[in-house]
Amino acid sequence: PGHVQLLPPQNVTLLSQDFAMILTWAPGEGSPPDVTYTVRYESQDRLDKWMKVPHCKNIPRTFCNLTCALSNFYVKVRARVKAVWGRAQSPWVKSQFKDYYSDVELAPPVLNLNVKENSIHVSASFPLPTCVENLTWKYDLNLWEAGSEDKKKYESNFRKDTVTINTTALRGNYCFSARALYESIDLKRSEFSQPVCVQLNHRG
């Protein structure tokens, strides 16, 4: 191709989803099928210094997970993306500013239940990017008898904590559900996870 007018990506959006910061976009009008994209980001404390994102250079997909590329989770960042096809390059298109700390969106944790004779051990696992594992994630746990509205709450457990519940007095079908918590500028919460129910002290 001699001179191709490569139109820039559209709908460039920096979004926070399930513990991750992700840049998404749509192909520009009339983009060739084998077009690729390159992403960079800048942070508000070093404006006009666009940092490369090695895993998002000349990629065919229309998103880039920036979480672990960020040097600081407490400073607002924005990203930009351009289309590349052969020697043709589109102009860069920038996203809005966001920062991980205050904009992070949480996903519900996955519960792991370990039923013993007179107790049950409940732990939560989070689909976290490795780079944010050391932030102080917590979770709330609810326990209730199936069909009852009366929930026993175990609140603000640290992510690695296992909640041990004495089940000696519990008979029947009991359900567990949890949500992720994160203390930023305000307290953020995920939705509650789908309930997991178990039969306790079933005399079969």
Image: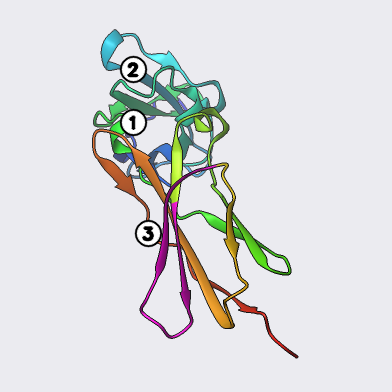
Q: How many numbered marks have been drawn onto this rendered protein structure? A: 3
Q: Is residue 44 left or right of residue 151?
A: left
> Looking at the rendering, in which quadrant would you find the C terminus?
bottom right
Element type where label 2 sits in the image? strand
Residue matched to label 1: 101
Residue 187 quadrant:
top left
Q: Nearer the viewer, residue 181 or 13?
A: 181
Residue 92 percent location from the top left of the image = 32, 24
Calculate the distance from the C-alpha at mark 1 to the C-alpha at mark 2: 16 Å
Residues drawn in magenta: 140-159
Eyeballing the image, is 23 above or below 200? Answer: above
> Dots 3 and 1: beta carbons under 8 Å?
no
Q: Is residue 91 visible?
A: no
Name the image quarter holding residue 108. Answer: bottom left
**Residue picked out by circle 2:** 42
Where disc 1 sits, the SS reads helix
* Label 1 close to label 2 by CB (< 8 Å): no
Magenta region includes residue 199? no
- Report, in whole angstroms, how far the alpha carbon at label 3 lies from the one at label 1: 18 Å
